[in-house]
Image (cartoon, rainbow, N blue to C red):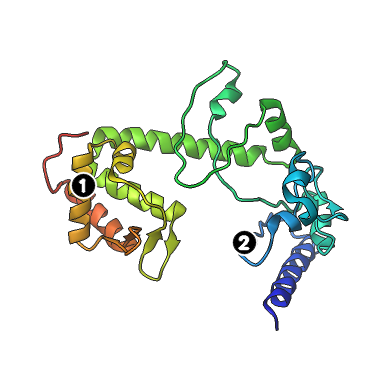
Amino acid sequence: MKRRTFLGCGASLSLVGARALAANGQSQRRLLVLLLRGGMDGLSAIPPLGDPELQGLRGSLVPPDALPGNGFFGVHPALPTFAGLMADKQALAIHAAGDIFGEMCLSGLGARAETAVAMQKTVLKEIPCGAFFTCLDRDALVEGFVRYLAVRVADQQQIIVNLVTVDSEQRLGKTLLRLGRTMGKRDPHSIRIELKITHEELSDMVGATGPRISILMKRFHSLGLLETNAEDFFVIKEVKLADYLAQLYVTGNATTVDCNL
């Protein structure tokens, strides 16, 4: 069986199964997530027809007979079942999920200046507040966005707590784990971060001096918690590093006196 046929059958069976659950009258709400990586042009399968720049950027790659989806996104004619689910607000396609910043402007307190550091090539799109609220309401995403904001607040609170109560060695270890888990590629025993991150960039993230970061990185290497491959990518030994940080937390002992909080 060809890979394309297998993926098509798998997606069809999954969608049929979702409809069967609804038809049986089950009261429990269920979320079915299909992760499609590679082998498919997502912007052809679910084209953002409501984007005025789409035709100019994609040209003949935009399916001329796309089915209606949710008012902004269309659906390739080869996916009529998915188009029906999207029209019924039972399915949602997410292209290149990234991050949101500047959400404080939604408070209505006036213009606010915020900064963000992109770790790789990034497209930044500005969304007016009114249009953003319309999208949340139209696609039933209000609850999800509120949860997202709660997580962001918790993350910021934890960063502040770490800066005050945790030494730089633990902060660096936690930063590497977070970068690996959110941006890295997993191997059986490690996580590989395929981005070249300098010690200066790490010092800004951790809140410590560049020389301090260099010393700690050398220690992590010597302990086998971290490796650098031939392409200068970090290879993080996730389990070993997490265990090491947990031991530091339990004992309360840092390897050296830290004056760079």
Instruction: Give the class, few, some or many, for how many residues have Cα within 10 Å of label 1's Cα (few <14, many ≥20).
Output: some
Inspect this view and state whether residue 28 appears. no
Q: Is residue 202 left or right of residue 224?
A: right
Query: Disc number at residue 6?
Result: none
Q: Looking at the picture, which amino acid does disc 2 mark? A: Leu
Q: Quadrant of residue 63?
A: bottom right
Kind of element beneath mark 1: helix
Q: Quadrant of residue 238?
A: bottom left
Q: Nearer the viewer, residue 192 or 157?
A: 192
Classify the position of the C terminus by image quarter.
Answer: top left
Say which residue label 2 marks: 35
Q: Is residue 140 left or right of residue 181?
A: right
Query: Disc number at residue 214?
Result: 1
- Across and down, in percent, residue 207 comes to 28, 35
Q: Looking at the picture, which amino acid does disc 1 mark? A: Ser
Q: Nearer the viewer, mark 2 or mark 1?
A: 1
Classify the position of the N terminus by image quarter.
Answer: bottom right
Q: Is residue 14 left or right of residue 233?
A: right
At horizontal 46% and vertical 34% (from top left) the residue drawn is 116
Q: Nearer the viewer, residue 145 or 96?
A: 96
Farthest residue in the right direction? 65
Inspect this view and state whether residue 15 appears. yes
Q: CA distance from mark 2 to mark 1?
A: 38 Å
